[in-house]
Image: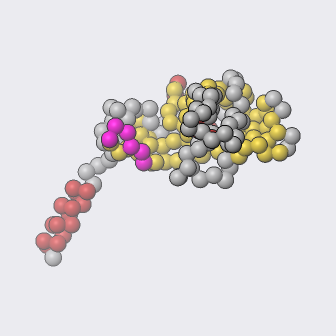
Amino acid sequence: MKQLLLILSISLIISCKGQQIVPLNTSAYDAPANAYLKDTNNEFNPYIGTWTATYQGKSIKLVINKEEKVPFEMWDKNFYRDRLIVRYEIKANGVVTQSTLGKDFTNDNSLNIRGLKTESNGAIVTLIFSGGNCSIGNGLIKFKKISATQFYWNYYPGSATLNDNMCPKNLDYTIYLPETENLVFTKQ
């Protein structure tokens, strides 16, 4: 019985070699393998919720959630991180033109908006948009906090052209997200 307890204790010590928790904005390049890039200061929390705006006659609804300890791989090392996931719905004249509200991004990254880092103690959040069909519109989105109930939306698409050799002609290549700066979203 003592030998069994000794073996279990040694196994537990070896397997629990301790995951290092590092601040959210730590570069994965500088972090040790299996580190957890954690939102230790809760900088993402003010953005969690439902937000709305109107732009060029369209209504935009964002539903923002925080996911914790999401695994990812970079530079042949495994890590974990906290991140924001933004689902959205865009309506024109009351008709939904694009929506990811019911979408599960676990196995499908199309139309995925995820927040990965903050600046100025959470006053700015940088997000990555994966783009639509053939990654059209992929780029950066920045939220800049105005108050507890409002933030600015700034969207900078990285690509808006179609690679004729790789993308089918019959897909919708419209960028529905508002391509603008300083669009005010209000918390609902």
Judge by depth and name the residue closer to the eye, 136 or 50.
136
Furthest residue in direction front, as rendered: 165
Is 173 left, or right, of 20 in this rendering?
right
Furthest residue in direction left, as rendered: 3
Q: Residue at x 47, y 39 (%)?
A: 39
* Quadrant in which the C terminus appears: top right
Q: Residue at x 17, y 72 (%)?
A: 4
Q: Residue at x 67, y 47 (%)?
A: 100
Image spot of residue 173 (x, y percent): 68, 37
Q: Which color mode does the image show?
A: secondary structure
Judge by depth and name the residue closer to the eye, 61 or 58.
58
Q: Quadrant of residue 176?
A: top right
Judge by depth and name the residue closer to the eye, 116 or 157.
157
Q: Residue at x 50, y 33 (%)?
A: 117
Image spot of residue 71 (x, y percent): 42, 48
Q: Tell whether position 70 is magenta.
A: no
Number of callouts: 0
Q: Tell whether position 72 is magenta.
A: yes
Q: Is residue 21 visible?
A: no
Q: Quadrant of residue 78?
A: top left
For the stretch drawn in magenta, the main secondary structure is: strand
- Magenta stretch, residue numbers: 71-76
